[in-house]
Image (cartoon, helix red, strand yellow):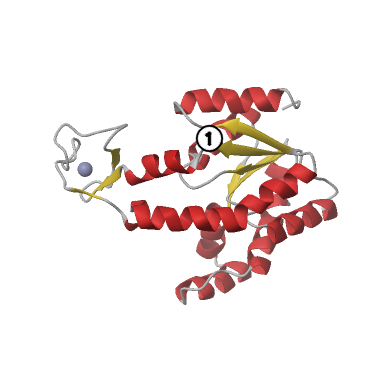
Amino acid sequence: MRLVLVGPPGAGKGTQAEFIAAHLAVPKISTGDIFRANVSQGTPLGVEAKRYMDAGKLVPDEVTINMVRDRLAEPDAAEGFLLDGFPRTTPQAAALDKLLADLGTALDLVLELVVDDDEVIRRLSGRRTCRGCQKIWHVEFDPTTTPGICDRCGGELFQRDDDKAETIAERLREYASKTAPLIDYYGAQGKLVGIDATGPVEDVTVRAIDALRSYGG
Ligand SMILES: [Zn+2]
């Protein structure tokens, strides 16, 4: 099965991607992993991407798409894959459709993790990271015994900039403007399946797998 996973920040995409890919026995392919692999192996695309990243610039779509193309052409992706973090925009989705067509195939489904903004803010703004061991806690869902102190190592907890209310609001705005049009794009193709991504992680996985099963996954 050839799948794309989409959803707002804080929807639990990374975790669900692991579980769903394992269930389907397909590789989980994230742009983060592809970038790191290309950069660490010093491929021409990796060298080019690193130049942009070192300059604090966004890596151009063309570079990202070429990396995705190389990755999808590897043997382990021949029977299926789960893409996480790509495409993020409608032009990237169109480029993905084209490169899959060049490979003689097409996406089967796009799974959308549906979480409303209030829930995203609640999940992300409650996260606290340990300065000592980097473990991530949550003031509501996974609190420490003593507020502000890590149970594991006694380190001090802090809130990362990414988890601050103003940053979350900015990320949600960016998602709404750039990624949400993807939902319409795939909806128009009849490939979109949305599932409720609130509640315990295991329940969300079950919902995702049930949804995929009804489409032959
Ligand atoms: Zn700690």
Foreground: 167 or 209? 167
Q: Is residue 12 above or below residue 34?
A: above
Q: Quadrant of the N terminus?
A: top right
Q: Quadrant of residue 17?
A: top right
Find the residue positioned furthest to the front. Answer: 118
Please provide percent x and percent y for residue 2: 72, 40
Please provide percent x and percent y for residue 134: 28, 47
The residue wearing badge 1 is 16
Please provide percent x and percent y for residue 11: 49, 40
Q: Is residue 134 left or right of residue 60?
A: left
Foreground: 139 or 116? 116
Please provide percent x and percent y for residue 96: 74, 55
* Secondary structure of residue under mark 1: helix
Foreground: 101 or 33? 101
Q: Quadrant of ligand 1?
A: top left
Q: Quadrant of residue 10?
A: top left
Crowding at mark 1 (Cα within 10 Å: few <14, some 14-19, many 20+): many
Q: Is residue 187 left or right of residue 119?
A: right
Q: Is residue 164 left or right of residue 77?
A: left
Mark 1: amino acid: Gln
Q: Residue at x 72, y 27 (%)?
A: 217
Q: Residue at x 16, y 31 (%)?
A: 145
Q: Is residue 159 above or below residue 209?
A: below
Q: Determine whether the beta carbon of the residue marked 1 sits less than 8 angstroms from the nearest atom of ligand 1.
A: no
Foreground: 7 or 97? 7
Q: Is residue 155 left or right of residue 54?
A: left
Q: Residue at x 80, y 44 (%)?
A: 189
